[in-house]
């Protein structure tokens, strides 16, 4: 049972003009797919061949297998990222909205924090909304670091690698971030992750 390329939860053109179909075709169809393919090549005919992605990531960390860790963690990060985006983001509601207001003061303040930290992040990485001990925090990770490097349970993530925005926004990462946080985050997905309280499972076949 190989690791799958998790399907986009919306059409390739659903995020136009913020992220074009060409960006999603390349980012999902080529970048994400390559991470999946390299993970599957690395685990073929090993004790990890039939394991879920989260087990593969844990094993790669324990074994200091950098190539497998990078590819498996990037596979997971991208699956989580596609679900973190939404064509028409409804605002946060209920327990999630209350947690955001308690932790950041307002939903707008959280959006500003995500966009500010994401813009300031040096080189490639990810900016996350994380639930930790009953509060919410924004954290950054570098390169292929994943949920395993956070201090709590991830609720949302935004990809900060240039390949996420270059076709549509060139070098202007702040424009990409502003557009995403303004009304293209999937707060329903964040609410599900908050309510569950445990890690999201990468889709399997
Ligand atoms: Mn990416």
Image (cartoon, rainbow, N blue to C red):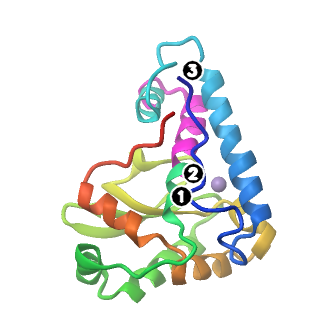
Q: Quadrant of ligand 1?
A: bottom right
Q: How many marks?
A: 3
- The picture places residue 108, in percent across and down from the top left corner, at 41, 88
The magenta span reads 61-77
Q: Is mark 2 within 8 Å of ligand 1?
A: yes
Dominant SS in magenta:
helix
Mark 2–mark 1 contact, CB under 8 Å? Answer: yes
State how far apart marks 2 and 3 are (Cα).
19 Å
Instruction: State the SS at label 3.
Output: helix
Provide the residue designation for mark 1: 81
Vertical relation: 163 (above or below) 15: above
Mark 1, secondary structure of its residue: helix
- Magenta run includes residue 74: yes
Residue nearest the observer in this picture, 108 or 19: 19
| Ligand 1 within 8 Å of the CB at mark 1 | yes
Count neighbours of disc 3 (C-alpha within 10 A) and say few if under 14, some if 14 to 19, many if 20 or more. Answer: some
In front here: 107 or 91? 91
Q: Which mark is residue 43?
A: 3
Q: Which mark is residue 198?
A: none
Element carrying mark 2: helix
Name the residue carrying label 2: 78
């Amino acid at each position: 049972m190989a690791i799958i390329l998790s399907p986009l939860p919306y059409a390739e053109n659903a995020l136009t003009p913020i992220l074009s179909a060409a960006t999603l075709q390349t980012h999902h169809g080529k970048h994400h797919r390559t991470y999946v393919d390299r993970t599957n090549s690395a685990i073929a005919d090993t004790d990890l061949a039939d394991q879920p992605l989260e087990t593969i990531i844990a094993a790669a960390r324990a074994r200091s297998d950098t190539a497998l860790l990078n590819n498996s963690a990037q596979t997971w990060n991208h699956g989580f990222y596609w679900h973190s985006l939404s064509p028409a983001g409804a605002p946060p509601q209920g327990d999630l909205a209350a947690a955001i207001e308690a932790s950041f003061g307002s939903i707008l303040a959280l959006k500003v924090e995500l966009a500010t930290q994401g813009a300031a992040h040096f080189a490639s990485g990810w900016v996350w909304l994380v639930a930790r001990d009953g509060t919410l925090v924004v954290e950054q990770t570098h390169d292929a670091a994943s949920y395993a490097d956070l201090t709590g349970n991830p609720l949302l993530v935004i990809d900060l690698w240039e390949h996420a925005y270059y076709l549509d926004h060139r070098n202007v990462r702040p424009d990409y971030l502003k557009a995403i946080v303004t009304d293209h985050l999937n707060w329903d997905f964040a609410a599900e992750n908050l309510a569950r309280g445990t890690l999201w499972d990468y889709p399997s076949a």
